[in-house]
Image (spheres, helix red, strand yellow):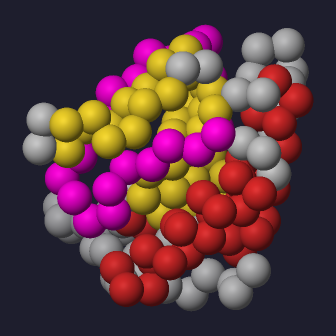
Amino acid sequence: MKAVLTRVSSASVTVDGEIVGQIGTGLLALVGVGRDDAADAWDTMVRKIAELRILDGELSVEDAGASVLLVSQFTLHGRTAKGRRPSWSDAAPGDMAEPIIARIAEGLRARGIHVEQGRFGAMMQVTSVNEGPFTVLVEC
């Protein structure tokens, strides 16, 4: 499982002209589920998103009471070493990835974190105002 976590002052996801998820201060979490991820990788990802001290003042999302905009991003598993066309074979298929993304959202909410989401499988327009900019890669 891979994620790109970006500290934002605002972020939103729009599908077909409708805003389906929107946050103020917090993290934009682009998460890619891999075909061969460990069964408990989602739990580790929840912990990383909630506890990494990457917000202003070295606070975590939990510490700051900040929000998370969670967006599924299979393209994080694209392999580009050969040729000019990325290979997506390492990405989990949708029927496997969708429930894992849902578990991540549920796990964050169980920790008291406000979570907004994109729409799985949809063509989304993701907008963010990056703070810093501050972006980290997480692999579980």
> Magenta includes 9?
no
**Quarter holding the N terminus?**
bottom right
Can residue 128 be seen? yes
Q: How many marks?
A: 0
The answer to whether residue 93 is left or right of residue 102 is left
Against 57, is 105 above or below? below
Give the extent of the magenta segment.
114-136
Q: Residue at x 43, y 31 (%)?
A: 22
The answer to whether residue 70 is left or right of residue 94 is right
Q: Please identify the quarter of the rendering in which residue 54 is found.
A: top right
Q: Residue at x 70, y 52 (%)?
A: 109
Against 28, is 37 above or below? below
Can residue 54 be seen? no
Give the percent coordinates (x, y) of residue 17: 13, 35
Q: Please identify the quarter of the rendering in which residue 26 is found.
A: top right
Q: Residue at x 61, y 12 (%)?
A: 132
